[in-house]
Image (spheres, rainbow, N blue to C red):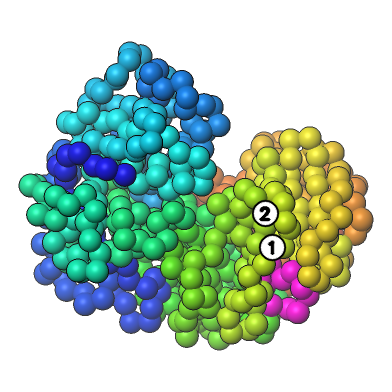
Amino acid sequence: MNTHSFLLPALLAALACPGCDGLDEAGLPGHDDALDDEIESRLLVGATITWPKGKPIEVCWNIESPQTDAAKRDLVRIAIEQSWSRVAGVKFTGWDWCPTKGDQGSERISVHARPGRASASVGKGASNWIGLDLDAPALRATAIHEFGHSLGFYHEQADPRTPEWCKDNDGDLRANPAGSVPVAYWDATSIMNYCNAHWALGGLSRVDMIGARKYYGDGRYNVEGLDSVFTDVTGDGKADALVVNWDGVYMLTSNGSTFGGYRRITSGPFYGGMGTFFADINGDGRSDAIAVNVDGLAVLLSDGTNLTNFQYWTNGPFWGGRGTHFADINGDGMADAIAVNDDAVYVLESTGHSFTGYRALIPHPFYGDRETFFADVTGDGRADGVVINNGHVGVMTSNGTNLVNYGAWSGPFYGSKSTSIADVNGDGRDDLVAVNADNTYVLLSTGASFTSYHAAGTGPFYGDRGTWFADFTGDGKADGIAVGNSTLWTQISSGWSFGGVYAATNGPFYPLH
């Protein structure tokens, strides 16, 4: 993680608790408009020597590094796409071999495997190469850190504001490198900070994300779980429409035929660096909000009208490298936290006021080539594991404690536009829905397999900004909801097919990132 030259400002510093009641729009304590204006202007000066906004950055693998095999290259690419590319308008392209040995051109990032050491020169005008010689999962965290350098961010522990307990182990960086701008707060949980206790988990802190956006623009903020959401926040049995924006969570309430009553349902920002999710975690029939952060799982509980009562439900980090989910594994009516990792699937069970009892839910790898879901496909009130693979759909059923008895429930089934799982016929069992360019297709669950494959729509139905399936009308059957650029379109489930397509809003409703 050694960094050789520092040309650009540091990221914004200290982690604020996302969603803490009373936080300002920027989500930082001690909000000061004049200070924010000063910070913004000083950061923009530095942006003149970053990579150009909106232009893809070419990445190549140095041909002197054959030891960096295809699996490692793919792991690095995915790590960067799931971190920097998801939080800001910075996109990477190429990912092939460099045209020449020792390629250190200023127009690309050249990735080089150097045994026993990882390093990166930073700034567009520097020799943009990175050395990586690690195995997963350390490779993931190191890649995100080193690409942070190549984007222009220096070590956070080099900030003069660093407390004495955090020593800069490079020894010569505490002097505030020329051209850098330390900004207001010190970030103990930054991926650029050696003193980050959770560094190896490879998560971007909230302020990492703010800093990346300062330099590279908004982009689409597509951190897993953070986008449009359709779930019942009010507790009336009908799925409401939610979007998570930088200043808060907004809602349109379903009346069974349209969405309306636009308003913000949080007092300020609420989102997680590793995803924002919605599920009923206390068993009152209303969906709550969970922010997955590098330091723990923060929640806002629904009171039927708003999301309030900010609290942390863990005393440490919990998320999965291959996905984080919230579903009721044990059948007590409260959604549990599920982390899917390369080696196993782990769970923290909800007590109604905390997540606790860390253990392996599945003591071996369990994830799909295309999708991984946790949903009740047997109808017993407990969430099962469902993986969508290229060749088949596999299921492990819940016995209330663990997921067991893996079996293939169908052949290949997935959509070119999206694949979802939801109870479309109202029998208490979740079904599979594949959205293709020509139509919407369904596999109904029998409780022991998926069967009755059929075209359930009347033609194409998908949104430019995504397609979801949730019970919009309150009749127990999941309906189709397509998020378009100008409106939310719905198609109502009859139990066997979808029909009655119409606009459920009189304007657009999607995240403004």
**Taking 390 as reference, is 179 left or right?**
left
Q: Is residue 199 magenta?
A: no
Q: Which residue is mark 1?
A: 360
**Residue at (75% x, 79% y) in the render:** 332
- What is the x, y in percent for residue 115? 39, 31
**Taking 241 as reference, is 27 left or right?**
left
Marks 2/1: CA distance?
Answer: 7 Å
Q: Is residue 411 above or below residue 274?
A: above
Q: Quadrant for the N terminus, please.
A: top left
Give the camera-side residue of 14 and 44. 14
Q: Is residue 332 magenta?
A: yes
**Taking 215 as reference, is 243 left or right?**
right
- What is the x, y in percent for residue 386? 76, 53
Secondary element under disc 1, as helix, strand or loop, is strand
**Taking 232 as reference, is 53 left or right?**
left
Residue type marked 1: Ala
Q: Which residue is mark 2?
A: 344
**Residue at (30% x, 37% y) in the render:** 119
Give the camera-side residue of 364 and 40. 364
**Residue at (86% x, 62% y) in the render:** 378
Are dots 2 and 1 in contact, CB under 8 Å? yes
Residue type marked 2: Ala
Report the magenta residues as a range.
326-336
